[in-house]
Amino acid sequence: MFGGGGMNPRKMKQMMKQMGIDVEELDAERVVIETADGDDLVFDGAQVTKMDAQGQETYQIVGSPDSVADAGAGGSAAAVEGGAEATAIEDADADDADAGIPDDDVALVAERAEVPQSRAREALEDADGDLAAAIAELE
């Protein structure tokens, strides 16, 4: 049986190193997997391990997705990426919409599009919080 069920973890690390396999725990706060069908998986606080075996990097995520967002559901995916609930903001007036755009989203759009944060916020407001649309508009 493989997996070293009763093997000493220190000895297992030593054997992996001898075989040229480097294992590193990553301090990941969030992992987002964007799927082709638009159902994005968001893992908050998952354990992420990077394994490098003979130049081939493999990432392992251990945990359950905290939310699943459908990119076609009126900005839900953007809300998940920004750290908000996976639901779209409904029936919000302009003041609530401004407050609904997290600063992290603004910073991300500003960085990706290489524009000032004020311009990034305007693009996000125009795109109803949709990160991808805001970045595309600015590029």
Image (tube, rainbow, N blue to C red):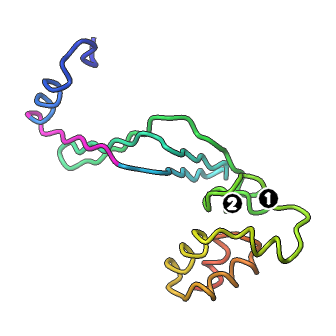
The picture places residue 97, in percent across and down from the top left corner, at 80, 72
Residue 60 drawn in magenta: no
Query: Would you say 25 lies left or right of 48 here?
Result: left
Query: What residue is drawn where x is 58% and y is 47%?
Result: 42
Residue 18 percent across, percent down from the top left: 8, 34
Residue at image point 24% right, 17% down: 4
What residue did someone put label 1 on?
88
Badge 2 is on which residue? 79
Q: Residue at x 45, y 35 (%)?
A: 62
The verdict on residue 24 being magenta is yes
Tag 2 or tag 1, which sits nearer the N-term?
A: 2
Q: How many angstroms separate mark 1 from mark 2 (CA)?
A: 7 Å
In the figure, residue 99 lies in which quadrant?
A: bottom right
Secondary structure, mark 2, is: helix
Region in magenta: 18-26
Callout 1–callout 2 Cβ contact below 8 Å: yes
Would you identify the image quadrant in which residue 5 lies? Answer: top left
